[in-house]
Image (cartoon, rainbow, N blue to C red):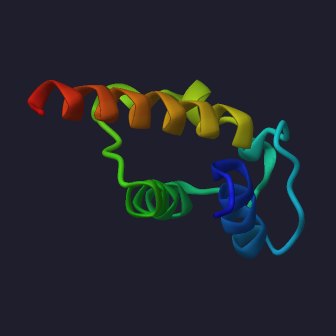
Amino acid sequence: MENPTSRIISFFSNFLRRQITPDENIFSSAAVNSLFLLQMIMFLEREFGIRIENADLEMDNFRTITTIAALIERKTVKAAGASNLHD
């Protein structure tokens, strides 16, 4: 299975129609708008089985592929921990 960074890069590259690097500021692209951000959040929630909460909606969490992958990591670790509490 592809790692999260590769899957996120693929999503962005398909949308922007060009390659994007993990540390490139996605907000510097004129193609990124509010509709794209909603699509990105829906993709992340569906693709990684996470829930993006209001508290997560900080620009710094979504500025680069690297910061998005870090958010996913935090969310999946948190979800796994919560799941283990219920076992």
Residue 71 left/right relative to 68? left
The quarter in which the N terminus is drawn is bottom right
**Residue 87 appears left or right of 31:** left
Nearer to me, 32 or 70: 70
Q: Position of residue 70 (x, y in %)?
A: 60, 31
Q: Residue furthest left?
A: 86
Closer-to-camera residue (22/59): 22
- Seen in the picture, residue 5 relative to 39 is either above or below; the reply is above
Q: Percent position (x, y) of residue 61?
A: 56, 30
The residue at the point 44 percent across, 58 percent down is 38
**In the picture shown, does residue 51 fall above or below 73?**
below
Q: Residue at x 32, y 34 (%)?
A: 80
Quadrant location of residue 19?
A: bottom right
Closest to the observer, 43 or 17: 43
Which quadrant, please, contains the C terminus?
top left
| Res 56 → quadrant | top left
Q: Would you place residue 53 above or below residue 38 in this image?
A: above
Q: How many marks?
A: 0
Q: Where in the figure is residue 13, as x and y percent of width and height?
A: 78, 67
> Is residue 11 left or right of 17 when viewed as pictured?
left
Q: Residue at x 86, y 55 (%)?
A: 20
Residue drawn 68% across the image and 61% down it: 2
Q: Position of residue 36 (x, y in %)?
A: 55, 62
